[in-house]
Image (cartoon, rainbow, N blue to C red):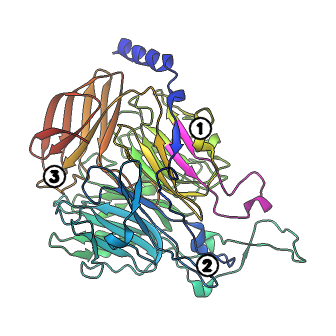
Amino acid sequence: MMTRYLMVLAWLLSIGWSQSLVFKDVADNQLLNFVHDHGGTGEKYYMETMGSGVCLFDYDKDGDLDAYFLQGAPLPGWNKKIILENKLYRNDGKKWTDVTEKAGVGDNNYGIGCACADYDNDGDTDLYVTNYGPDVFYHNNGDGTFTDVTLDVGIDNPHWASSAAFFDSDNDGWLDLYVTNYVDFSIENNPWCVGPVQVPKNGSLFIRSYCDPDYFEGVEDMFYHNDGQGNFSDWSVRSGINKARGKGLGVVPGDIDNDGDMDIYVANDKVMNLLFINDGLGHFTEKALFTGVGFNENGRAEAGMGVDFGDVNRDGWLDLFVTNFSGETNTLYLNEKNGFLVDATSRTGLGHPSINLLGFGTKFVDLDLDGWLDIFVVNGHVIDNITLFNQDYQHAQEKQIFINQGNGTFLDQTKSIGGDLLKPAVGRGAAFGDIDNDGDIDIAISNNNGKADLLLNEGKPKGHWIGFQLEGKTCNREGIGSKLKIITDSGVQVAWVNPAASYLASNDPRVLFGLGPDEMVTTLEVQWPGFGKDLFENLTCNSYYRIVQGGSLSIISY
C-alpha cells in the first residue's frame, strides 16, 4: 500500500498538478447575462449586504444543469427603470437562454436563496425560494413550467429566510425541508449605524455604514415534515429545532455520526453555530457545544456564512468547513469519530490565507481529480465603504482555491492558478456542479450588486474520474442522503448525495469522485437511506453512471 501511495504522489508531482487547473469565466461568451441588484438607495438597509444565491439543477430533464439566480427588489427611494425578478436560464450547450417567463418562476420579492429537490417523487426537480418576505415553493409540472404551490402544500414562513435544505429526516422516502432564518429586521425600523472609525466628511464626524448583526435579534428556524401526500406540516416544535435560536445564514445536512440518518448544521452570524443530531425519527437534539463545532478553537463565536460537509482525510467520516468574516479565519473541523470534532484550521494551513477576506459560498470539491477533496471559497466584504475604516480590507475580493495535499494540509493555490479567480467581485452565493458534463466541477456565482460569474474548469491534464446519478424507488427519488463508497487501487473514498451546501445555494445532485491515476473502481457500495444496499464491481473510469435502487446500473450518454 505504501508503495502505491508513493507512486501516486510521484505521479502528481511529475505533472505539476495544481498548475493544470484553469478556471475561465464564460458568462458573457455564453449569454448568461444575469446582473444582481440589491435595490439599495444609500439608506443602508441591512438585507443589501447579504446578496443572493443561485441553484444548479436540471429542471427540464435534458441531461444538463440549468441555473436559477435570485434577485433583489426595489427598496424605498429606488428609481431605476428596470424590472427586478429572479431568473431561470436554460443550459443549451455553450449558450444560456432566459426561460423565466415561460417557466413561471420570476418571483419579484426580495430574493435570498433557493433549494432544489424532487419533494413529491414524481421525477421532476422542484424549487424552493427563500425571501426577505414570503417564501415561494414552485412545483415542477414536468413540461418546462412551474406552479406556485406555497400555501397549498402548507408552507408559511413569516421570517427573513436565508438558506434551505431538503433531506429525509426519518427515512420514510419523502424529503423534508429545513429553512434557516436570519434576524428580525424591518425596513420601517432601519437603524442609523456608523463605521468602526470616526472619519471627517462634509462637516460630519461620522460616515454611515451597514449595521452589525448585534443590532438585531435572531429568530428561530423552521422545519417542515413531508407527509407523502403532497403536504408539509410545521414540525419546528415537534422536532425540537425551535429550542435553539440563532442568526442562520448557511445550512447543510449530513450524517456526522455515521448512524444512517441526516443531521443538520447551521452556520450563524456572530452567535454559536448549531448542530442538530437526529434520532432517526425526525427529532433533533442541539449538540454543537458538546461536539466542538459551536465555537472556534479559541472558544469564540464567529460570523459563519457558507458551510459544507465532506470527508477531507478519507477516513470515512464527515468533516466540516465554515466560511467566516474578515479578521476571522475560515474554520475546518475534523471528525474525531467519537462524537467530537476538533478545530484543525491552523495546523492544516487554512488559517492565515483567509484572515483579510470575507468568505461566503464554499464547497468541498475535488477540483484536480486526484482523489482528495479541495476547498473553493467565494469572497466579498459586506461593507461597501470598508476601505474608509480599514485599508487592509476590500469590498470586491478574489476567489480562493485550497488544494488538499493528501497529508493533512492544504495549500492556497489561488495566485498560481490565477486567471479569472483573481477578478475582484463581491461574491455571495455559489453553486457547484459539472455544467458541461466533462467530468470536472464548475461554479456558478452570484455577485452582490454585480454580474454573475460562470467559472468553467478547463484545465489539462486531469486525473481520471467517475460520477453517479441515483434514482430511488423506496427511498426519495433523487437518493438524497445515500452513502457511496468506492474502492480503487489507491484506497477508499466515501461521499453522500447532498445538493444542499455552500451559501444560499443548491448544487449538482450527482456524486463525482476524482480517481487520480486509477482507471477502475473495483467496488462500489451504495447505502440507500434506510433501505438497504446495492453492490457493483469493476466500473471503468471517465463516465457517469445511473444507479436505480435495487441493483440497476447503466452508463449515461450526454
Q: Are marks 3 and 1 in contact (CB under 8 Å)?
A: no
Label 2 Cα crowd, 10 Å radius (few <14 / some 14-19 / many 20+): few
> Which quadrant does the N terminus fall into?
top left
Residue visible at 35% across and 37% down in the picture: 439
Q: Which mark is residue 472?
A: 3
Q: Which mark is residue 80?
A: 2
> Which quadrant does the C terminus fall into?
top left
Residue type at mark 1 is Thr
Q: Which residues are magenta?
A: 376-402
Q: Which mark is residue 414?
A: 1
Magenta segment, prevailing SS (helix, strand or loop): loop
Residue type at mark 2 is Lys
Q: Where residue 412 appears, x then y in whole percent?
A: 58, 36
Disc 2 to disc 3, C-alpha distance: 47 Å
Decide which of tag 2 and tag 3 comes sooner along the chain: 2
Residue type at mark 3 is Gly
